[in-house]
Image (spheres, helix red, strand yellow):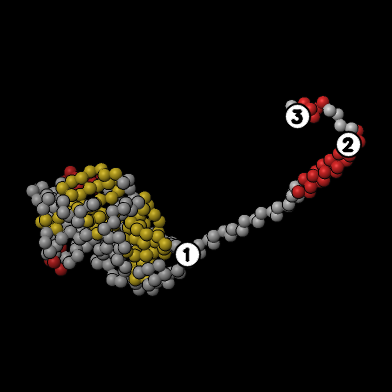
Amino acid sequence: MLFDRFATRRPPGWLIAALAVPLLLVTALLVGRALTATPARQSVPPAAAPPATTAAPSPPMESVPPAAPPPDDLPVVTYDPAPRGFPPDPDPAGTRPLNEGLRPNRNVAAYDAPGGRPLAFLAPTISGVRLTVPIVDRRSGWTAVLLPSANRTIAWLPSGGWTTVVLRDQIVVERRTHRLTWSRDGRAMRTWPVSLGMSGQLTPLGRTFVLGRTPPPEAVYGGVDIFALGAIPDDPGAVPTGLRGAHIGLHSWYNDDTLGKNVTNGCIRLTRSAQRLLLTEVEPGTAFVVVDRLP
C-alpha cells in the first residue's frame, strides 16, 4: 500500500531540513494573517439618552369672578313669585339626589350668574319658615341653588352669609303613572298613588323642594298638615280666585276616591297615613321632582 511504503522509507536528513524551513515560514505567515484578519473590537458609541420629558402644564386655576356689591333696594324673595331674570335650571328633570342644602343666615344677594348681576335677596325665612334651598351646582367661589317661589329656576350665591346642611331624602312624582316615590340616601323607601292637576292646571314639571309645612286651612285636607313646595302654578291665572298666590302643595284629602286621577288645581294629593309619615321624616329643603315618567 502506498501509505505503508511511505512510512517504511525514511527520507534523508537534508530533505527534512529543506522542507522544515519553508513549512515554518508558511505557518508563521498564516498565523500572522489569522491574527491580523480578526477585526479589532470597535468601540460602540453610547446610546443616546432619551429626550427629557417635560411635565404637562397644570390647568390654569379657575378665576373667581368678584361679586358686585348688591344695591340695598333689591327685592327680597318671598312667598310671592320671585323676581324675573334668573337663569333656568340646567337640569330641570334631573333625578340625581341633591344631598346638600343652603341656609341663609342673613339677607344674601342672589345673582343671575357667577360674577353676574344681583337681582334679589334670599332671606333667612319665608313666611316665618326657616329657608333651606337645595344646592344644584358649584363653581369657584359660587354656589347655585333652586330658587323658591319660581319654577325650574336657579340663583347663584357668592360665599359667605350662609351655612350648609345634609339632605338625605328625595321625593319623585311621575305624572303618567300617578305615583309618588320617597327615597332616602338613594334607596326607595315607599311608593304611593297620588292625584294630580287637571287639564289647564297640570302639576308643574321639574325640580323644586319642600319649602315648609302649614296647618290645613279647611276640613277637606283631612286634618293633616300640608307641605308647601317651592313651586308655583305654571299659569297662576288659571287657578281659582281663592288660590291665587298659593304654592303647589303636597297634602292629603278627606277621602281617597280620586287617587290616580287628574282632579286637583295642580297640587299632589296622597293618603293621610302617607302624608303623616312624610311629615315626620322629610325635612325642609328636600328635593321634590315632578317628571312625566321615570326611565
Residue 179 coordinates in the image, percent (x, y): 18, 49
- Give the residue drawn at x 37%, y 72%: 117
User: Residue placed at 25% from the left, 43% from the top?
Assistant: 189
Residue occupied by mark 2: 15
Q: Quadrant of residue 67?
A: bottom left
**Amino acid, disc 2:** Leu
Q: Secondary structure at mark 1?
A: loop
Report the residue at 27% width, 46% height from top: 183
User: Hey, what amino acid is under mark 3?
Assistant: Leu
Q: Which residue is mark 1?
A: 62
Disc number lying in front (3 or 1): 3
Q: Secondary structure at mark 2?
A: helix
Instruction: Classify mark 1: residues with Cα within 10 Å, few (<14), some (14-19) or many (20+).
Output: few
Residue 241: image location, x then y, percent: 12, 66
- Mark earlier in primary sequence (3, 1): 3
Q: Name the residue beneath numbered marker 3.
A: 2
Residue 203, x across and y down, in percent: 17, 59
